[in-house]
Amino acid sequence: MFSLRDKELADDIVSQISKAKVHLKFMHVCGTHQDTLVKHGLDVLLQKCGIEIGQGPGCPVCVTTPKEIEEILLLAKQGKTIATFGDMTRVPGITSSLQQMKTEGCDVRIVYSIEDALLLAEKYKEKEVVFMAVGFETTAPTTASVLLRSPPKNFSVLCCHRLIPPALKAILQMGEIKIDGFIEPGHVSTIIGIKPYEFISKEYHVPQVIAGFEPLDLLMGVWMLMRQIQQGKAVVENEYVRAVKPQGNRKAQQMLQKVFEPVDVKWRGFPVISHSGLRLREKFASYDARKKYEAELGPLAEEKFTEPVGCLCGEVLRGLISSKKCPLFGRECTPENPVGPCMVSSEGNCHILYRYTKK
Amino acid sequence: MCLAIPGKIIELDKKKQAATVNYGSGTTRKANVSLVQVQIGDYVLVHAGFAIQVLDEKEALETLALFKEMLSLQEGS
C-alpha cells in the first residue's frame, strides 16, 4: 500500500518533463533520495530531460565536522564506552577512527537506536556511556525522548544534531551554485511539517517540493517543481501527503523544544551556519558530554581542524561538484578505504555513486 | 540516516510506550512509540527504533490516482 509502482504513470511524468524542454538544476538534501535516484537511474534519465539533480549537505554523518570526530575519539581513548550508529564509527579522524580504536581495545558499540545506548548504560552502571547523537530533525526527537525519561547518571550525549532549513538558506546565501528548486526530505518533514521551509520560497523565490522515497515520488516531485517554475510560482508543496502532515509531528516538536535549543554550528565543507545545530538546554547539562567532560575535551577547543588532504567532500556537500570529479574517487578513496565521510556513509554521495556505478 | 520503514502495529504497550511492528514477510521488531499517538492496526514510519509518524492509509491509496489527475490536468491546460 505504501510502495508506489506504476510504469505507465512514470512514463507519463517523464514524457511531460521531456516535452517541456527545460534546463533546470535542482538540489535535494537526503541520502535516501540520492539512493533512489541513482539506484533506479533516475538521475541519468532526468539529465536527458534537461534536469540536473544533485545532493547537497543531506547526510548527517558527512556533515559532522572533523572537530566532532576528534571529540568522540578523545572520549573513546579516555575509556568511555562510545555508542553510535554504524557509519559514524568508520569516519576517519586525523589519526584514527572509532572502528580503528575498537580494534585497539577501546569500547565502541554500534547501535541501531539511542535506546540501545540507554540499555548499555542501565546494564553497565560502572561504565560511562557516551552516545554520539548525529542526525537531522528526523533523529533528534529520538534523543529528546530518551533524555526526557531521566536516564541514569552514567549516560551522556555528544550532541551533533543539525537542522535542514538553515543549511538550505546558507547554500542560497553563499551563492556558489544556481538552484532552481529544492526537493525537500520527506522524513525530516514528517517531524517539522511545511512551515519551516516557507521563508526559503518567500525570501529567495525558490520553489520547494517535499517528496517521498519511491521512484514515482521523486519523479512527481521533479514534475511539481517544474510546474511551479512554468507558472512563475515559488511555494512549498507536499508530494508525500501519505506521511507528511502540514503541521508535522507536534508531539515530537514539543519534545525537541523541551530538550534542545538552537546553536550556531559549523558543518563540514561550510562555515558556521547560524542556528543550524541543536544543543542540550541547561536543564539537561548533566547529560551533555561536552559539559560533563569539559576538562577532558578542553585541549580540542583551541585546535584548528582541516579536511583530509585532497578530499573534496566539502565541494560535494555544497553541490558544486559530482563525486566523480574528485581525483580520489574510486582510486585512493573507496568504501573499503574511505578518505572522506561521503565515501563512508551509505547516505554519502560518493558511497552511493560508487555502490551503483563502480562495482 | 533518515531512512524510515513503514510497518503495522500489531502489539502495543502504552505504559512502556513500546509496540511490535510488522514490516511484512514475517519481519517484526519492537519500536518506541513515545513520539506518536497510536493504536493497534495503525501504520507507522519507523526510524532508528522510534515510530516518527502515523501513515495515512487513505492518502496512500489515493496517491496514484491523484498523480494521474494532476498530470491529465496539466496535459489539458
Image (spheres, coloured by chain):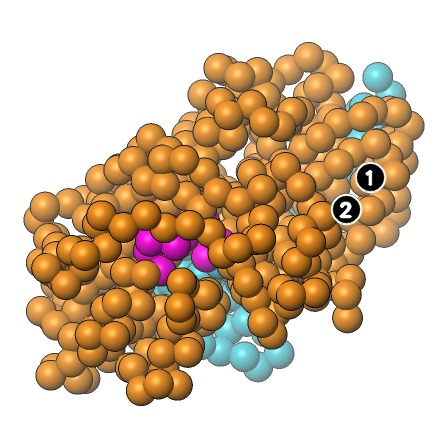
Chain colours: A orange, B cyan
* C-beta proximity under 8 Å, tags 1 and 2: yes
Tag 1, which secondary structure?
helix
Q: Residues within 10 Å of mark 2 (few under 14, many from 20)?
A: some
**Which residue position holds label 2?**
A43
Q: CA distance from mark 1 to mark 2?
A: 6 Å
Instruction: Give amino acid for label 2.
Output: Asp
Label annotation for residue A104: none
Q: Is residue B4 above or below residue A34?
A: below
Seen as rendered, the residue at the extreme top is A232
Residue A234: say if magenta: no
Tag 2, which secondary structure?
helix
Q: Is residue A221 visible?
A: yes
Pinpoint residue A113: horizontal percent, then vertical percent.
36, 69
Magenta portion: prevailing SS class? helix
| Foreground residue among A217 and A349 | A349
Range of magenta residues: A61-69
Left or right, A25 with reference to A141: right
Q: Is residue B5 above or below residue A271?
A: below
The part of the image, by quadrant, that contains residue A359 is bottom right
**Which residue position holds label 1?**
A47
The residue shown at (29%, 82%) is A106
Left or right, A32 with reference to A256: right
